[in-house]
Image (cartoon, coloured by chain):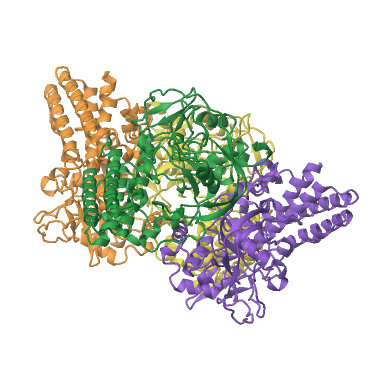
Chain colours: A yellow, B purple, C green, D orange
């Protein structure tokens, strides 16, 4: 979204309105080709039905933008149905039962979206002459919130279809040309007292600040993500059978859930196959492994005699090594692949820091020094989840380009696997790092 | 269905074909007004989605009629999806996840029904000249099977909608004229060595035979079912708070599930209300209470200083006292009320033995003496469920008229409440029975 | 116990007192050789610690005999700790946590027993001159209650030890001489209108009456129980792998609990071994299989082209064929084997109807016609459990001789396996029964 | 233990042997007054029976000291029974079933301890002339391991007794003189680049190193722990009823477990009472609140407009402000109170940093930069638990004096409450911190 880069107030209002319409449209475009019945699927508690995402992202604007400005809700009953976790916004329909809503229908939800889109657009239009900073801030927050749910629509829908006996994702994937395999290289990064956190330019979630100083010792970071075939080597080397490679909680999760491979992998008798949005195919040496939990990423790193980076190491390297250059990016939602893509040949330096896969760090999701939860219900957005989760950095093939940032702190419980989450290795500086 | 009453073979074939088409059509008529999303709802493990019922009743004909006659399945994948519990017919989609099928869509399932209906109708047509007894028997079984599922479509859909926050069943029910309340009367029945079980005329399920002799002591049976207001008196007299009224398992179920009233009752602050297919209304003195478990029926009977009848007592009284007379029936599916109706004034004798509510007996569901499970997969229909369930007799407002029989043995676990199950009292003959 | 056979009142009082002291002593004798820690074990929710049995059988006398006669409890806190399921007697310590009581200690419980024994004995002594029928009835009930718990002490302790890593029951059992194997024979029994239930001579539990008439068709009963090696043949013939042999609930239990053999059987690589109170040994052709559930008994019968008897068939045959003759009995608790013993050669007729194993019938545990629950808290003894359980008849190697009766109705849920429960076959009369 | 402070090798060997005997004896002293049945209690999965602790701490010496030196185990079966979580040491008895071991008896376990103590003492004796560093290191590790279990014996036993209906901890506690209440004061600490981690003098667990640099901004730390009455004010101000005070996971835990107060508090109708090892008493203004989870500590801090310290802030303040001075300590195990004691008057500065309560920090339990898991089975001691837990600092009334260290990193899941865990507040430096 261009909104952050526009200075004049009138122009900013117009740009925000354009961004708003584009984001709203994008969400609907993601649901194209799905039937009303597909949009009701909830294959596990963590994954919501697409219809629910479509409605909840509209509820967010009603709750935080339209309601406080006196605009009546489209349907008062939606308040409880489509509130996710905002205790301050009243009661909520149980998360586990979001798939049990046949009413409102998909058509009614689409009409609801339309009404909300028009009402917010009208507000922005009316506001253009005398722009209001709080309105802009809340609409911008609403857009980034909706972009988060765009990513969830993609990952949840993949899970829903993967659990469907008559899934449309059953066929072999069309072949992609193989890129020349590239050896993983270690990039040395010198430490010191470095600034971490969002620098204040453009939008950021509250959890990306305050910007603060962190002391880092020197370290090395892998120039690319771990590939599918590298991960397969870990598997064939007993990766899932050797408890000493695993955290204790991770081994317990592996046993309880019978993990033998990443999520969405399946053995067909001859070998493992990987489910992509285009279908099933063999593991590739040029594509990053995804759908692994923090526990698996940690075990892989231990097996590889390395470790996961801290989030400060990740961010410091990304910022200082220019990881945001377009040529170094991986696949993003805008590319429509909905899966990590082959690593391009002929590009060097730190790659895949934005795109392809989110990358598990070794950092727990905790508040930055000096962090304060914002006042009001919107303060429930981030702070209260700072417990029991691990930080992921980067962006994935399901992340909208305008939503990705080097300071972005994504977070999931260490056992979560249905996101496009992969592995980047790190290690301490030292003789072995030469 | 008139089929049982026709003697000439050619006529029988034509009658069966007409019955077949009528039953198939009736199932589809029950789904009218439901959206594709409604038809996917599964609000609890015991209740299946309507789409699944629509498909499973077609699968039954494919499995037992079309397949053995060399007619290829419409879609081989349906075999596992729509098999209910026939181990002999291969693997089955898990019962708890029937609501997770977005594909095939409702439209595809309706097309599937069409194909199966046409194929069976064609078989019957071709068969008219040289009628085959096995074909007739299996199609007849299929029709009765489908009628059982018609009842489940009604009871399951009521449960699904009752759990929907935006249920169409939320409004107050239109008022019905009240009938004059009628005192419950005891009808004396003399015992002796009496015949029990189906007498061989017309269709019956295997579990209704063999016909055999049972010794009964004299007893008395209530002339009508327990009413909603009578049950309310039990509630206000501490019926749900006095463990000594309850079987031990029943009290445990009551505690675990927090029962305070029948299923589909709700207290609105002023008093209890009852959910019917037409909406909510107050309890009535002229309507039979339904949606009670065996445990509740048993506790009510103990509170009323009576007991539930055995199934032999029930059947013997029904047969000897002419309980099948049309004027004495209660509501059946054909009446379209989908709820017990007010007891008509001016009718005496044993009423509601066919219609309004199924009636819990004190008999466990066990095989009759001499019962043998039929050979083959179709033998899984009844016999293997003869454990842990109680027999209900009669028929309900959701039972097709042509499906009801005095020898019919319905059965459910003692804690089941989502059927139209009510209470008829009995007691031993004796001085107090005068 | 001889008490029932004595007519003179004074003699009866003396006899009851002697019986009382003998039964109390017997319970304590069963705990000999167990450490305080052994007596605290609770290896599953259904099996209580021996210390709890020792205390609960004393609590019973305090609750129903001493308390109502004004004798203060030894320790008021014991009322809740050692009440089993009598809602009318106040709150109860949770059943699942009976193993969590370190206090009172075993020594304190033994002292508690002593005090209660003395108090009841004193009452009986004082009563000798003017005997009171209610006192006699309650003490007699208390003795039979205690004998039931003697059986549980044996079966529970076997389970506790079987779950102990350092169990004293680990060694091979000393060899017993093998009896000549005896072919199972069918004994024909003619039916008719037969009396069932206790005839009023001597003590019986309330659930054994009222005596009433039942119509039976002719049938045949096996002259002995199914043996261990016969059951092994069922196992090797795929008995645990063929769902069509099983009731639906039984198959679900088998899958959920991974049953492959009776409880307390173990495969040692070379073959199956059976755990007895004397240790492990190979299955024998002359010993009745035990520790099978109703589901397994039913599946075995179906596999053997037979069925289980109804409880009326069992009782009628037992009474008319003289099954109570001493020579035909199996092992009882008084024999101290604590396991079924080899079937004696040279004895013909209906054997093992009293001793060796309880025998699953095909009858649900329901009230006899005319049964009324007794008034007061003691009425909770039997009636409220008449749901969801199956009747077993006979007696086992853990049943005291004076506790066994042909009219005795034992009952357990169909999945219970830790009792000495075995299999007797029956079949309908007919050409094949010749 | 004086061992760390001795330089000469021979003296060190003698000192270690003396320490060893003292620690072994101390564990046994903690079990004094407990019956064999008490020592078998396991009131929840996280709390082990005292008998198990007594055995496991001996197994540790057999596994890591005696076995590798060729000394045969006392009983090979103990290896699996008393292994806690060392996958490399073979199979383990399930943690949840540690309370189900009646055998070996308490007496046998005491004899086992004796044999192991003698064997290790003999090794140390033999070693005195030519001391072996690995032996010393392993025995020292074993002693610290045993001291950890001493703390668990105290906290677990309190839990076991609290769940006993006939608990010896039921009486009112004898009155203690009240100290004058002391206002909590903020102590300013300047930040900078500070060293964190054990400095290499004397014993430390591997997780306390490597020593490394951390950047801290200035902050303030409370001079004492939150008191029972302060916590009561939080409770009466709706602390347990306002979700906005809580982390999302914390609120879910509170709801699921019905928390209304710290563990071991009970409302007696008139007010709250606190369970101490001496009995029940009212909350005090001079005693630190304990038995709170991380979630409760975090909610309290938010309510108090403060926060919890990071573990680096805690350690840096402790080291620089002299928190280890004897006068400033709280109660330790050596004081035999087994509960936090009144804060002494007339002492200023940073108190209770060693003793009274462990103090929840805001830091997840993660490896320090450069941390490597030690080779071999002993490497399972700490590293594999670095996931899903929070760090506690300090020491408690159940910690042996010679076991406490300022660099000590204790860790428990954020919902754990049965340890002596309390609350110390922190806040950022700034205008409000003056």
- Left or right of D22? Residue A273 is right
Between residue C278 and residue B141, name the one nearer to us: C278
Between residue B258 and residue A253, name the one nearer to us: B258
- Left or right of D11? Residue B308 is right
For image coordinates 33% across by 52% down, the residue present is C7
Quadrant location, the C terminus of chain C: top right
Quadrant in which residue D264 is drawn: bottom left
- Left or right of C31? Residue D1 is left
Residue C290: image location, x then y, percent: 47, 36
Count of marks, rendered view: 0
- Left or right of B405? Residue B3 is right
Between residue D407 and residue C209, name the one nearer to us: C209
In this view, B288 is above or below B21: below
Residue C267: image location, x then y, percent: 47, 27
Quadrant in which residue A216 is drawn: top left
Residue D430: image location, x then y, percent: 27, 58
In this view, D240 is above or below A176: below
In this view, A187 is above or below D434: above
Residue farthest right in this picture? B129
Quadrant location, the N terminus of chain C: top left
For image coordinates 64% across by 80% down, the residue present is B176
Q: Is residue D43 visible?
A: no
Q: Is residue C112 visible?
A: yes
Residue C177: image location, x then y, percent: 43, 22
Between residue C21 and residue B139, name the one nearer to us: C21
């Amino acid at each position: 979204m261009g909104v952050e880069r526009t200075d004049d107030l009138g122009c900013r209002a117009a740009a925000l309105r354009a961004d708003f319409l584009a984001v709203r449209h994008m969400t609907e475009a993601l649901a194209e080709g799905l039937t009303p019945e597909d949009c009701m699927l909830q294959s596990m508690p963590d994954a919501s039905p697409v219809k629910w995402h479509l409605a909840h992202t509209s509820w967010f604007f009603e709750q935080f933008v339209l309601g406080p400005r006196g605009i009546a809700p489209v349907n008062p009953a939606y308040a409880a149905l489509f509130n996710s976790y905002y205790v301050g916004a009243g009661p909520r329909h149980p998360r586990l039962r979001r798939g049990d809503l046949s009413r409102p229908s998909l058509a009614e939800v689409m009409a609801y979206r339309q009404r909300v889109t028009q009402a917010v657009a009208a507000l922005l239009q009316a506001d253009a002459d005398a722009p209001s900073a709080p309105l802009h801030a809340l609409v911008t927050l609403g857009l980034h919130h909706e972009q988060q749910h765009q990513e969830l629509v993609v990952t949840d829908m993949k899970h829903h279809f993967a659990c469907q006996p008559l899934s449309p994702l059953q066929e072999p994937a069309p072949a992609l040309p193989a890129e020349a395999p590239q050896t993983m290289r270690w990039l040395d990064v010198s430490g010191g007292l470095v600034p971490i956190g969002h620098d204040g330019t453009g939008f950021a979630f509250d959890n990306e600040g305050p910007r603060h100083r962190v002391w880092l010792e020197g370290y090395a970071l892998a120039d690319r993500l771990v590939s599918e075939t590298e991960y397969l080597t870990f598997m064939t080397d007993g990766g899932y059978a050797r408890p000493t490679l695993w955290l204790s909680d991770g081994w317990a999760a592996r046993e309880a859930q019978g993990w033998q491979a990443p999520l969405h992998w399946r053995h067909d008798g001859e070998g493992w196959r990987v489910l992509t949005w285009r279908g099933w195919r063999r593991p590739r040496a040029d594509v990053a492994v995804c759908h692994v939990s923090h526990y698996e990423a940690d075990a892989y790193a231990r097996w590889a005699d390395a470790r996961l980076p801290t989030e400060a190491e990740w961010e410091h390297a990304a910022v200082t090594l220019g990881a945001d250059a377009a040529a170094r990016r991986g696949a993003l939602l805008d590319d429509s692949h909905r899966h990590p893509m082959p690593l391009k040949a002929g590009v060097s330096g730190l790659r895949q820091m934005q795109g392809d896969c989110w990358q598990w760090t070794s950092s727990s999701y905790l508040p930055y020094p000096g962090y304060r939860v914002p006042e009001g219900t919107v303060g429930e957005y981030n702070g209260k989840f700072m417990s029991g989760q691990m930080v992921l950095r980067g962006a994935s093939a399901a992340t909208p380009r305008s939503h990705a940032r080097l300071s972005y702190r994504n977070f999931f419980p260490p056992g979560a696997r249905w996101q496009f989450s992969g592995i980047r290795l790190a290690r301490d500086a030292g003789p072995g790092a030469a």
